[in-house]
Image (tube, rainbow, N blue to C red):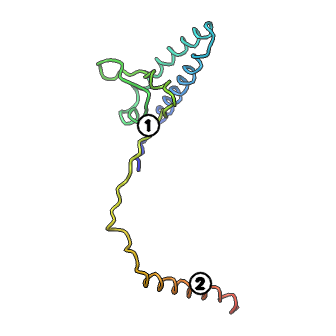
Amino acid sequence: MYEQVETGPLYDKTVKLLSTYRSIAARMTNAKVSTQGKLDRRLEALAERIAESLSELTTMEREALTCWKHSSVFDGQYEVDYDAIIERPYVSIRRIDRWDEEQDDTDAEPELSTEGQEARRKRDKTKLDAFLRIDDDI
């Protein structure tokens, strides 16, 4: 069982920014020193854009995302959770929470006794035979 959250285009934009941030952070580990400087500047710029985008999201949309955290004690300021976004194995940027739905057994159809099952089989066989004989009558 799950609950779907209504999201808008800003949510999709934020997910794309977080995904880009993750891929650049992954490249950072194996990059040369000269490339690391460029990637670091790009990560900083992306982090600022993500923080702006996170602050513009609704509370429900923000809760539907992972890999972010509050950046200060003031409300409305958010940032990328670097440890969560580069954690392996990767977690989904979109939050996926599932839980088991408890089933009420009182609504279930009662099981038939062996005699009832035999009677049902005979009825089904009779119906099938009648259906198959339709072509013979034509």
- Residue drawn at x 61%, y 87% is 129
Image location (x, y in percent) of residue 9:
49, 34
Rendered view: 95 above or below 78:
below
Mark 2 and mark 1 lie on one chain; the one further toward the N terminus is 1
Rendered view: 109 above or below 32:
below
User: Is label 2 in a helix, a strand or a loop?
Assistant: helix
Q: Name the residue under label 1.
A: 95
Q: How crowded is mark 1: few (under 14 residues within 10 Å), some or many (20 or more)?
A: some
Image location (x, y in percent) of residue 31:
62, 14
Q: Which mark is residue 128?
A: 2
* Mark pair 2, 1: CA separation: 49 Å
Q: Would you say the residues marked 2 and 1 are in contact, meaning their CB atoms lie under 8 Å apart?
A: no
Rendered image quadrant of residue 115: bottom left
- Residue drawn at x 45%, y 25% is 84
Rendered view: 22 above or below 113:
above
Image location (x, y in percent) of residue 20:
55, 25
